[in-house]
Each structure stands twice: as C-alpha cells, then as structure tokens.
Amino acid sequence: MSLGIDCLPQRILCAFALLVANGTAHATERPDCSRPLSLALHEHGLLYSRQTGGGIDKDFADELIRRSGCRINVTVMPRARIWQLIESGGLDFSLSGIANEQRLLFAAFAWYFSNKYYLLVRRDAGVQKVEDFVRNPQLRLGAIRSFRYSPSANRLVDALDADLRVSHSTGLAPLYATLLANQIQGMIVEPFDYPALESATIREQTAILEFDDPAVPHGLIMSKRALPLQEQAKWRALVDSMRADGTVERIFDKYFKPELSRAMTRF
Amino acid sequence: MLLTLSVGLASLALTTWLWQHEQRSLEANLRADFDFSVRQTTSRVEQRIAAYEQILRATRGLFDASDRVEERDFQRFVNTLANGSEFAGLQAMVFTRSPTAVSPADAVAALRVGSKPDLPLQASADLNGVAPITYVAPDTPINRQVLGRNLFANPLRRDTMLQARDSGDIAITPRIDLLMDDPASQPAFAIYMAIYAQGQPVDTPAARRASLRGWVHVAFRLHDLMASLYGESTPGIALRIYDGIRTEPDNLMFDSHPETDAPTPLFQATEYISFPQHAWTLQIRSTAAFERRHERDSARIIAFAGASVGLLLALLTWQLATGRARAYKHARRMTRELRDSEERMRHMAQHDALTQLPNRALFADRLNAALALARRDKTRASLMFVDLDRFKPVNDVYGHAIGDRLLVAAAARMRECLRESDTLARMGGDEFVVLLPHIETDHDAERVAERIRTALARPFLIDTHTLLISASIGIGIFPDDGNDHESLIKSADDAMYRAKDSGRDQLIFASGP
C-alpha cells in the first residue's frame, strides 16, 4: 500500500492514518441518492419562518440539496415531532440540532455553527441573576417542547419543570405573546430570536441575562436508523465543505451582522 | 427505659422515612404519568392538524398534476380521501379560485350573496378583491349552498388566505363560524393552503403572490376534530382548548369535562400549539379520577405496619431489659410466700387450732428444755394441770360452739395470769397445763395457780349466756415431785385429780396431803 507514510516504525499511527484515509475516501464520494430523502425544518425565528417561507435553515437545506444532487423532501413540523421521527428513522435529516447523551444514541451530527443561550426575563419580575428566577416560585418559564440548551440553561429548565413551573409550546411565537401577557415571566432565547427581541414592545418590557456557558455547537441532524455510518460520513464531509468554502458564513451574513455571523460559524 | 425509648424512636424514625419515601415515589409516579398524559394529549391534537395538512397537500398535488381540474375531478378525489374514517370530522374540502382568475360575472354574483338581487352594487365594490368558492366537496345539499360565497368577505378568512398564499404553507384561521352553520353555533376553524400555477417560481413571497392559482381549505368544528382523535382519551385528564393565548371564557372552544371544575387540581399544565401568527392554548388538568387511578394504600400500610412493629419492638426491648429485675422480684415474692407457708405449717403442728395455745408436742419440748435448764442451774420449776370444772354441761346445754368460745375465753384469762416466759398449753378437751420454768419457792407456783383459779371462777359472758365454771389445779414442783418430765407430769396430773375428787375449784400440790 502506498500512502506516502512510513508505516514500519509506528504501527499505531499507521493504523490511524489508514482509518483517516478510509474516511476521506468516503467523504469525497457523493451521498447515496437512490431514494428520496426527507428533511424537516422547524419554525424558529431566523431559522425558518412559515410567514416568509425562508430562513437560515431553509437556505442551508437548499444548498445541501444543490450540492448533494439528491432529491430531499423538505417539510415543516414541530421540533418535538422531528426528534421523534429522527429517533424512529422516519425522517433522515433536520437542521440546527444540538447533541446530548440521549440524542447521541439515535442521531449523528455535522456541526456548522455554534451559539450561546440567554434568559429573556420581564423587567418587572425582579430578576437580576439567573438564580433569582429559580428562587421566586411565582415566576414561570416558557419553553419549546423537546428543546435543549447549554448546560446551565438545561439545569434551569429541568429544575423549574420539576416544580411544574414551565409552560410548553410547540413553537416560539406563543411564548413571546404569553411573555408580554405576563403569563410567563421568562424564556430562553438565542441569536435567531434577535429580530423579535428588537421589537419595541419586547425591548421595553424585557431584559437579557447571559448563562455562564460556552457556545454550544449546532449541526445537521442525521438519523442513525435511517442513514448508515458511511452515508453519515459523506454528509458530514459535505457540511464541512460548505463551512470550508465560506458558504455557511455567507448564509449567516444574510441574517446577522458580519462579526456575529463570523463568531457563530467559526468555532 | 432509655433503651426502650431509643428503640421506639428509632423504629418511628425509620417508619417515617419509609413512609415519606413511598409518598415521594407515589408523587413522582403521578407526576410522570401526568407529564406523559400532557405530551400525549398535545401530540394527538397536533397530529390531527397534521393529518388535515396532509390532505390539503394531497389536494394541492391534484392541482399540481393538472392544468385544469374540473369540479367532477375534485369531487371524485375528495370522495376517495374522505372515505377514510380518519377524516370523519371533516365537513368540507373547498377550492377557491384566485381573485385574479374570477370572471366579473362570478365576482358580482359573489358580492350579491346575502343581499337583494335587484339592488345595485355599491360603487366602491372591488371586483378584484373577491374570492368566491369554486368547488366544494363532498357534494351535499348543505355544502352546495356555500358555492359562490365570497371568502374575502370575512376578514379573518381573508387574512389567513393571504398568509397561506405568501408562505406557501398551511395557515389556520382563528375561531370562525362555518359557512353552513348558523352563526355562533360551535367553534370552528379552517386551514388554508395556496395552490400555485404550474412551472412558475414560488421561492419568494412575491413569486408566490404572482403565481397564485387559488386555495384549498378544509373546515372543521373543534368538537368533531376532538371526537375523531385516535384512541381513547386519557382517563382522569380534563382538557380545555382556548383560541389564542388567553384562557378566558370567551376564548374557550372545547371542554372535555364541562360539568367538573375542581378549584385546585393536583396537577395543571398549560401547553401552546403554535400555528403561523396564531396559537391554541391547551389547559390540561388532573381530575379526581386521575388521582383515584393512582391511589395506592402502600404509604398508609407502611405507616400503620411501621408504627405497630415499632411499638412491638419497644415492648420486646422493655421485656428483655427488665426481665432480670422482674424475675428477681417474682422469686422474692415466692420465697416469702413459701416462708410464710412453712411458718403457718409449723404453727399448726405446734399449736392448738381452737385456742392457738401450744399443743402437747410443743409443750413437751418446752418442758424438757425448762427441766434441762433447771437441772443445770439447780433451780426449781413448776408444772400445773388445770382442768375446767362443769365444762361438759355447758357443752351439752349450749352446744359445742358456745363450749369452744368458752374454752377460748378461759385460755385468754389464764394467759393473762402468766408471765411471758411461762407456757400455757392445751392438752385436749377442757384440760390445760401451765409451765413455770423458773420459781423461787413453791409459794410462787401457788400464787400463780390461785390467780388462775380466781380468774376462771368469775362468770363468763358468751353471747347472752352467763356461764359459771371453776378449775381444779394440780401443782407439781421440780425436782421435788419428779426429776424428769414424765414423773413430774404424773405427779401434777395426780394432784389435779385429787383436787377434783376433793370437791373441785381448788388447787392441790403433788407433794401435799
């Protein structure tokens, strides 16, 4: 075998090199398009809006379809339903997903951006720090069912949920409305929610608190049940190539200021 | 006692801990079950809406597949779709042509619906802003009535239709009245989806607006939708659905348990189902049936059994801890009883049962001891035989009971005449003996004997009877009248008989005449 690597002295390194070479070989191949694939979007701020029919995820999906040459049926559904279908293998892909231990059992990821999470609270709730929110039993949090966040935000949501202090929603829009109606006093937001946060009514009535967590990587969600390992590697390579040639950053530039899109896509 | 208390308290603490643990576990199970019910309830409503979306997409497929879909094609297609029980709640599938494709005649007809046919249209009537219903299926008399109705006349419908047109996706109206229903009957909704011209770009809202061909929509009553949900509803879960995010009575569209309104349900959750520009609020409450379904007696059993076992343990500990002390106490009581019993037996063996005076056996012992002492000390002692005179007639006349009481009274009088160191014994019948273990002279014995004779000569009052008796006393002196007990007794006994023979009521010395 001629790989241009001297294999004799360090067999372990050699084996690793072979593995990498093998992975690269898969990655350079085009994904298997012999059947129509499925990708689900969920409505969430700048990621996708049913109102406009566009968003970051929509653009990303279009580029994925273009590069792969595959036929991918794109649908819109609640996030909780998406995770159920990814787990059962009824859906091949979704976008902007974050991993946790449980999700890694049934989903693989190809990262293409990262972002931080923030707690949006009503100014009249008397919350100066994230901990204040937990301490006041009168305060309720709104959350999208099945959503996960950064570790500190997850802890907050789980603690409040255990106290029956979380109202769940299938989408983001009712949460803003209930926050303004003071039916909930806080919700967790991320940069995709900035346009909503910039509306005058929300800006006047709310404050943003930062969680003390690093940015959490988001990526293409692939159903392990629907896609074999080799196919996952090919799709991951495709996403990597979109990052490498600046396509991902260009998509984000359409929606964010350049410095923010750079911070989100170069991690 | 401290140990018992400690064991009791430890058992109680363990029971309390177990009880609390069981309570917590029950509550956690209840909570998990309620959470599951909430997710299931929300998910079933969502899936039903998704099913309506699917048939709208299928209908859009029909229009995408053909440039010209005739009413007959539409009817056949919808009839095939509606054959499935899945769409039992579906009232009508409606196709409405884009306002730009409506002929002026149809637009005028649509604007005239509901007004008198001969009245002229208002000058401001906008023939381009009219969206009359083109096809409606299934073809029923009620559904046919809505053909030609202008959907844009209702601002809620109009906004939703324009939203569906711009997004290319479904759009759901807020609460409306169905076209075929009486106003303000049951809460109803319509879901719209736009249909675009074949081969035209639809990637932007502007492009979608330009290539609009029309809309398909389904209308349904919420009660029909809820009735057609898959599977049984979760027992013990009450569901209310509100239009919008405010849970006010005016917004209430569906209530699974209208008659029950528990003020404080154990669990209550609020969930929002999000539609574009619109939301439903699902208020989900646990009812008493939910709590009953999960009712288990384990916590109560643990509390009761734990308290009982704790009590028993404490009792057992008390038994063990105090066993030795209680055994000692018991043994002491038994020993005392045994000793008393022995004492009684000994007394009975040595005393006369009637007068409690020493009997013949005890007297013999005392006599021997007294004589031995006197012999050693070379002192004198006296032995007297006292026989009651005229006792037998008392017995015969008044009976044995009176006779016995007389004997007791006589014994008491005799005892009073003696020193403590002297012995009075009953030998049997009316015969007594007196031992004076130490006398200086014979006169000492005579004085005592005389005192006895005098005492017994006084009348006795027994019940109401005055009884008169006397005593014949024979006195023997040691060592003069006998050097041992036998000879002394014999001497005294003889003397007593002599006294009797000499006329009774007198005393005679053995050595006397």
Image: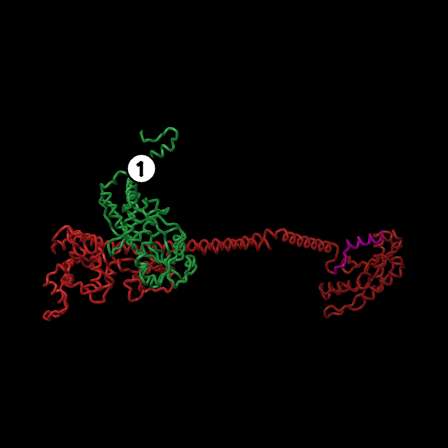
Chain colours: A green, B red
Residue B452: x percent and y percent?
82, 64
- Tell me which segment is drawn in magenta: B355-372
- B12 sits left or right of A176 in the view: right
**Is residue B125 shown to the viewer in this render?**
yes
- A205 sits left or right of B129 in the view: right
What is the residue that sits farthest to the front in this orientation? A258
For label 1, the crowd category at 10 Å Cα-Cα, with few meaning under 14, some 14 to 19 and many 20 or more, is some
> Along the line of sight, which residue is nearer the eye, A3 or B12?
A3
**Is residue B239 shown to the viewer in this render?**
no
SS state under label 1: helix
Residue A29: x percent and y percent?
26, 38
Task: Give the residue type that dot 1 points to.
Answer: Gly
- B381 sits left or right of B22 in the view: right
Chain to which mark 1 belongs: A
Residue A113: x percent and y percent?
32, 48
Can you identify the residue that label 1 sits on?
Answer: A23
> Along the line of sight, which residue is nearer the eye, A148 or B484?
A148
Magenta region includes residue B362: yes
Magenta region includes residue B224: no
